[in-house]
Image (cartoon, coloured by chain):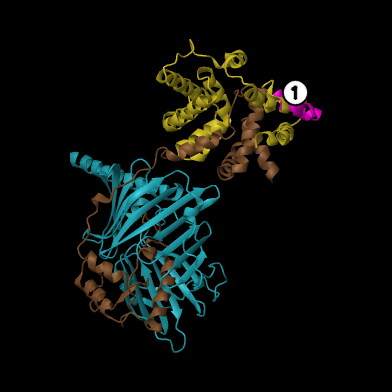
Amino acid sequence: MGERSIDYALVKKVQQGDKAAFDVLVLKYQNKIIQLVNRYVRDPDEAMDVAQEAFIKAYKAIGRFRGDSAFYTWIYRIAINTAKNYLVASKRRPPKGDIDASDAEQYEGAAGLREYATPERMLLRDEIKETIASAIDDLPDDLRTAITLRELEGLSYEEIAETMECPIGTVRSRIFRARDAIDIKLKPLLD
Amino acid sequence: MRWLVVVLLTTAGQVCAQESARQWLDEMSNALQTLDYDGTFVYLHDNKLETMRIVHQQTEGGEKERLFSLTGSPREVLRDDRTVTCIMADNKSVMFGKRRSRQPFPVVPRDLDALSDYYQLEDAGEDRMTGYMTRVIKIKPKDALRYGYRFWIDKETRMLLKFDLTGVDGKAIEQLMFTSLGIGGGIPAAALEPSLTGDGYAWYRQENSDRKPVRNTDAPGWTVERLPAGFRMVNFQHKRMHQDSVSAEHMVFSDGLATVSVYVEKLAEGKAPVTGLSSMGAMNAYRAEVDGYQVTVIGEVPGVTVQMIAHSVSRLS
Amino acid sequence: MKDKLHEQLSALIDDELEEREQALLLRQLAGDAELSRRLSRFQIISDALQNHLPLRFNTGFHERVHAALNEEPTVHRERSILATLYKPVAGLAVAASVAMLAVLSLQSVRQEGPEAVPAVASAATHDSYIRAAADDTVQSEESARAAQNLDVYLVNHSEYAVNRGMLPYVHLVGHDMTLRNKE
């Protein structure tokens, strides 16, 4: 795991007894973990319970985390195990084979529609996605380019700076201002 | 030739033991200053048992500490990087002043050899305290003019868990022991706030030590003729000790471990001097009158020592 | 100022926060719920764009986890030492009752001989305590002031006392004794 990674710094802090640092890790990965658990545990409420359990387990085991893998990789495995154990305990059969993170998205749409995609629930996630998409459309060109390169192309700030031919500081500022503008439209939805 | 080798090995072993003891103490001192902790400890002295609590935090914003009594009348000391505040409920006073920067342990002398002329450092090995493995480090005085010390240092965190202050006979005069201790973890801001407000108390402000001295001399106008071996002056200042009094001369002496302060102040007209020994566990003070001046000697040394020092204070002509 | 902080949140999401910015931001987050919620929303924006949003989720999830964590003991460090090793010293009962006569100060004892060290269980010390208990507890203004003056020296000296591991100021805070200035 990169020395510079904030995850690395956060884990170290947690190991030294800083609980607040763990909160930040939860904020970063909660959605991904809940989505992952959702593959095994269909009910959204149960999925959140299991995801919470996975985070608690990770916290308790943080002393043993050595840093030879990324934190997300580590908690990813914990989440899968927790989900599987939950299914065994509640006498349900887990899906065949572990689901790789990369093909997780493929399963989402179809399965979701079939079993638990009630109109209201879908509305929440899709409404969020639509709000964000429309907010991005309204952005000035430089901000939209910056956030698109970052989120959809996965480029680093340095790479974006090269692409847009501007200083890294400008990249950082543009991405922030893009998020800030989106946030203004997102906030009322979530409060 | 063999006896020479034996002697060399013994000396080397001794040096190693001293080095090890010194290292443990350095690390303990570092732990006390850099870790965040919140603990309750008992403090035994003069047949009395006090319970106290200490909360300590070190952040990139600085160091903060709060020490307060849980038994008896409320007393608190709060410290941060810049100030020290002492609040006493019983005599209704608040004293605050500028904080001196923490000295490394020990201050003087820097090298082990000089200290070992007056003290014997000893790594006394491991001792198991309930659930903890500790290292016991002893500092034994080589004469009867100073105290000895015993530290029980937690192996894992290097925190001080128990401490004895001993007389020359090795018996404990004071003892300090944590009964519960939490290290690391978030220290809530409230735990570092004073519980005494000091409302209606008399406030005493320490005069800044960097104020201009009353006299234009760099050296004290007084001298101390009798000091225990190894004590030398480590600090000297002019400062006003009380609101309406003249400036005092404050000399600080240390042997690297124990520190003794000598304050000399001119007695105001018609004011009677205070004399005699005062004892607070291992802290002793002796007051005397010399040439119309009040001399106060205070330090973590036996009563005989402060008395000896006080009686040897004289004016330089 | 706020904007700067929010920009740091954005950099945190992308793992592009400078090391020197980390400590302060983390401290701010710990104490500011609104800041945490903003971080959460920034993360939602990112997760949404990368298709990492679960079908249904609760925006208060991290608060839930936080509450559950509060039930957990802090990782690694916190333990309790039982005071079972400590044996009370004889005479404690007497000392305790005397201690109730409050007023913090040094106890001034006029010593006759050269041997001025008060031993832990010396009879002289006990006598002076008991005598103090019998005396009128109202102190003269003179002796009260004298006691107070010594506190000033004690406080001042404590700052110079080398930190030899004995927590400085323990003497000051740890003594609650009857004031007597015997002449």
> What colour do you see for chain A?
yellow
Could you tell me if residue C119 is visible in this image? no
- On screen, residue B92 above or below A82: below
**C133 lies above or below A174:** below
Relative horizontal placement of residue A121, taking residue C123 as reference (left or right): right
Give the letter of the cyan chain.
B
Query: Depth check: A104 or B19 in front?
Result: A104
Q: Report the predominant secondary structure element of the magenta stretch.
A: helix
Is residue C180 found inside the magenta-colored segment of the image?
no
C156 on left or right of B138 = right
Span of residues in magenta: A132-149
Residue at image location 46% in from the left, 61% down from the top: B195
Where does the image place residue B272, in percent across and percent down from the top left?
Answer: 40, 86
Residue type of the residue flagged with mark 1: Thr
According to the rendering, which colour does chain C have? brown
Spot occupied by residue B48 in the image (x, y as percentages of width and height): 28, 64
Residue nearest the viewer, comparing B269 with B174: B174
Residue at image position (40%, 38%) is: C76
